[in-house]
Amino acid sequence: MDKLLLLGDEAIARAAIDAGLSGMYAYPGTPSTEIMEYIQASGEASDRKIHRKWSSNEKTAMEAALGMSYAGKRAMVAMKHVGLNVAADSFINSAITGVNGGLIVVSADDPSMHSSQNEQDSRFYAKFAFIPCFEPTNQQEAYDMVFDAFELSEKYKVPVMLRITTRLAHSRASVKLIDKPVPEKKLTLPSDPLQFVLLPAIAKKRYRALLATYEKIRLDIRIEKYNHFRDGRKRDLGIITTGIAWNYLAENLNESMNDIPVLKISAYPFPNDLVREIAGRCKELLVLEEGYPLIEEGLRGLLDNGIKILGRLDGTVPRDGELNPYIVAKSLGLPASYGMDVPELVKTRPPSFCKGCGHSDMFNALIEAVKPFGPGHVFSDIGCYTLGALPPYNAINSCVDMGASVTMAIGAADAGLSPSVAVIGDSTFTHSGMTGLLDAVTKNSPVTIIISDNSTTGMTGGQESKATGRIEQICTGIGVEPEHIITIVPLRKNHEENVQTMSKEFRYNGVSVIIAARECIQTAARRKKAESSN
Amino acid sequence: MMKNDIILSGVGGQGILSIAAAIGLAAVDNNLYLKQSEVHGMSQRGGDVQSHLRLSDKPVASDLIPYGKADLVISVEPMESLRYLPWLSKNGWLVTNSVPFININDYPPVDEILNEIRKIKNHIILDADSIARDIGSARSGNIVMLGAASHWISMPYPGLEEAVRKLFKRKGEEIVEVNLKALKAGREYSKI
């Protein structure tokens, strides 16, 4: 039996390869990116010709994975939690169509928002869609669950969610691999040709069937085996953990854990019996969840008149943010160790542009061009260039979701803001900016869209950008006037010229696109290194 | 029970993960349990980064080291070494490079930082960059740091040497040799 040292993300990827995966679909997003990257780097995936190309966004990834499943093969789609918002339409409806080949949706949550705009908890999405959800405690469980998730998916014909969080995604541990990989499935069409046709008459039937299936899944062995209740002789306090909260509990309790009744939940929908059992034995229940208080809210109900519940809702555990051993020790009333305070002279060190980054030269020009109009004119987006919000630039006024710079600029222009400027990266533009640009063109909004084109998906580590070499054509195709599609090179020596170009387009009463094109210095360095070693 | 909790710290782009990778390889070869938590994403752009590395002869529960339990902080940047004092145990060691990485306007005077570090009971301050340059491999500063901290890593030294060999094997024998020299130079420096 082989053992490998793998990140949580890599364990999932390795398992998918070993479980007969035929197609991997994803858009890069921290902390999920390394799943696709592992499969792209795998020699075996290459030999087997497993599909492993990045998609334009999470919705296209989700739909392509559903198409692979339609054709009878095993597919996985991975995204960061907010990516699931982008894919939500197809995700929710994929539960109603159901699947043919096994389909796993990996959603990587980021509690404490290390690299994100919010800390939404994907388990709610699984519940919302009535599909099962696995929440691994460690890297080995993450590996093992992929096999069960594919089987469950094919047995009940539903997509299955695998929900992880940053700590597991980006923590390495050794993982035992299975001895005999599962062969890939053959191309087989669904037995019911109308399965995927969600006309109301069909959808109604399928939805009712889904509701019934959800209750059956609750009792399936593949769910049951990841949910343990272990009784202890103490009767005052019982503890329920979900996902990696278990690790922090084990870290604190060591051997004394055996005295306390503990219910460890790692798969949903979980058997209600186990919850009744632990609640029936204890005076109080402490709920430790990595994420929102999903189980805690269920336990309390609207009346909250059962046994005493301790958790995020009563302040025993902080209401927001990720757990850690310290928080869990406190919630248990244990003395928590602490080293020394950080000396006052230690300053915060926020992320910043790399030296020589094209985004910074673009911002320097933009700041000067927009200055005469006063503050508040620049909408921006998700990517490295969001760092333009920080000093010394203080150059942008929004960062909401992928593509929102373009459409917010349109709305603000509708309200009379002039100039109304959007700053968006190349990969974010092809992810979700193009449709907004079409809106602008069809009503001739007076907006200036600056596409800061570094020919890569930079923030997540320099993955390929679908926009590379296509931006001008896309903008022309959408209908932007060719004389208002202007490419500039963001370099210090072009500063004056770039300021003038921007100022001129700000005065134009229609849609302008300024493409500030210079390759990301990190991606360029990696590219040159790869080229020289070939 | 053997347990060795190590925090690696530095600034995004300084390559602390190569130190983590070397210790990780050695741990696997020595049949130890290991969990190693890393920072990926936004902070890698010049922000503060750290890695929690936990070695034990028993399975490791938490991916994160609890406060006050780190046996060792290895920092490739002096101010960053102080950021992790809440994790350092009373008898733990702090081993840091003395060369600052200044990418913020309000970076404190280096002397003041070094004075704060000297207040810690068990500390080693070394100019890993110079030591690496003297060997003729300016880029091996991180391996010098690993060597300097090696006395407090619960693994036989040859295990770390073997890991460095494996880590740099792809880059050729010359690179392997110079990094082994860097490892040794760091170890010699902090010998007590």
Image (spheres, coloured by chain):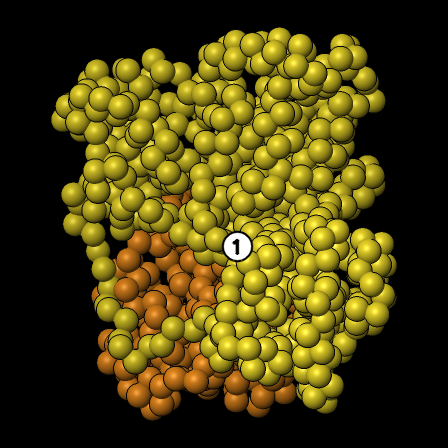
Chain colours: A yellow, B orange
Question: What residue is drawn where x is 65% and y is 19%?
Answer: A98
Subunit of mark 1? A
Residue B83 falls in which quadrant of the image? bottom left
Residue A278, horizontal then vertical, whole percent: 26, 20
- The image position of residue A389, as x and y in percent, is 50, 69
Residue A457 in sight in this render: no
**Vertical placement of residue A234 versus B65, above or below:** above
SS at badge 1:
loop
A7 or A512: nearer the eye? A512
Side of A468 relative to B135 (left or right): right
Residue B73 found in image quarter: bottom left
In the image, A325 versus B153, the foreground residue is A325
Is residue A151 rendered to the left or right of residue A172? right
Residue A80 x %, y %: 56, 45
Name which residue lies at 62% across and 67% down.
A421
Q: Quadrant of the C terminus of chain B?
A: bottom left
Residue sitting nearer the eye, A88 or A323: A88
Horizontal side of A479 relative to A416 (left or right) equals: right
Q: Quadrant of residue A282?
A: top left
Residue A432 visible here: yes
**Count of number-bearing discs:** 1
**Residue at (73% x, 57% y) in the render:** A444
Residue position for label 1: A400
Q: Amino acid at mark 1?
A: Val
Return the x and y of residue A338 as percentages of the image width and height.
23, 60
Q: Quick one: label 1, few (<14), some, or many (20+) residues within 10 Å?
A: some
